[in-house]
Image: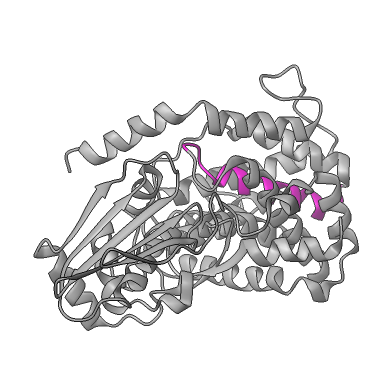
Amino acid sequence: MKTETFISILSDELVVALGCTEPVAIALAAAKARTYVDGKIDKITVRASAGIIKNALAVGIPGTGQTGIDFVAALGAIAGNAEKQLEVLADINPSAIAEARAMVEQGIAVVHLAETAIKLYIEVMIEAQQRYAKVVITDNHTNITLIEVDGKIVDTGGCANASFKSSKEERSALTIDSIVDFVHTVDLGELHLVKQSIELNRKAGLDGLTHSYGLEVGKTIKENVQRGILSDDLISHAMALAAAGSDARMAGSTLPVMANSGSGNQGIAATNPVVAAAERLGASEEQLIRAVALSHLVTIHIKSKFGRLSALCGVTVSGTGASCGITYLLGGGKPEIRAAIQNMLGNVTGMMCDGAKGGCAMKVATCTSAAVQSALLASKGKSISSTNGFIENDAEKTIDNFCRIGNEATSEMDKLVLEMMLNKEL
């Protein structure tokens, strides 16, 4: 596999994002629709798939102190800049926030569950001055597949079934061995996006450790280390930095992060545990960049089979990538990296996704702890045996089994979880 292909995959799947990608994608659709209709907005109608609603329902909207699909759709229509893609909400101001709140209170923005088999589906229709514009996003968070204005189809761009920006042919060529070979040999100058992911995601983690966001999972770990209740070791350091990044992101921090495969939390969870491990192990900058590149690529490799959205938590995937990166820092080669994958998937598989929200930071902490433990075992040549559950002798086959569980065995669970989320008493 050529170096250019790996660089292309990284360029497509590592994307700077401001705010959780599901509500941001809704804002993007609304901002795009608004460019086609002028005047006072009479109504905004959002129709979205179950996975989108689940992940957009309770997460903080950057710089607003607000949550809500209706709110973010209104905000995107009022002040969103569609040209900025996943940074669509970068230019919002207090007056726009107040106007969006007022629209929600007036019932102008409404949300419905779309009747679709597409896992990632967003449809936003804006009605104004007896005109309307409808924008549809499918399969990935910036893939606009339909623009309709006043009954006329203006654009049918985007790519059908384009769950990933990189091509299926490129991703199908990814293997554990080819990823490790690439990481060992690539010129560091080619990995500028990986370096940027380290800078952005570490900064988000430090922000979460400094300020009070959400559940303060990362900050609480750090405080208890300082109190002597928790050990000041690699696991605690990694858990704190990774969870704090998720605390900040889920609570609506205005700092951008580098997303992996459409998820900022996955980007943070693939990056910060490796950064923390490098700090504690005294690794060089080169070793850190190569280790994080390994983590990102393993995450992309698994996610390409696992899918953009699932009933299972995506941080289990990026935690597996992080474990590979930490194993690399511990001196591990291909056998040890395969062992890390076996250990992680034999441990955290089955962690349920119940939407994007403050509690995600605890799942990030859990998967980070497992990532370090799995790497430490793998570096000693210890691997969960193929006699255990769905684990195979070949880590690639274990990945396939894991993805089958996520894709084939969880649809009813996803429906049940969404029903509970929509019908609970608050």
What residue lies at 47% left-to-right and 69% top-to-bottom? 86
Q: Residue 148 or 178: which is nearer the viewer?
A: 148
What residue lies at 80% left-to-right and 45% top-to-bottom? 175
What residue lies at 40% left-to-right and 64% top-to-bottom? 24
Q: Is residue 328 magenta?
A: yes
Decide if residue 332 is on the left or right side of residue 98: right
| Colour mapping | one colour
Residue 6, placed above or below residue 352: below
Whether residue 212 is visible here, answered yes or no, is no
Residue 148, placed above or below residue 374: below
Q: Residue 334 or 177: which is nearer the viewer?
A: 177
Tell me the quarter of the image containing the N terminus.
bottom right
Residue 119 location (% of width, % of height): 45, 44
Residue furthest to the front in view is 152
Decide if residue 45 is on the left or right side of residue 169: left
- Prevailing SS of the magenta stretch: helix
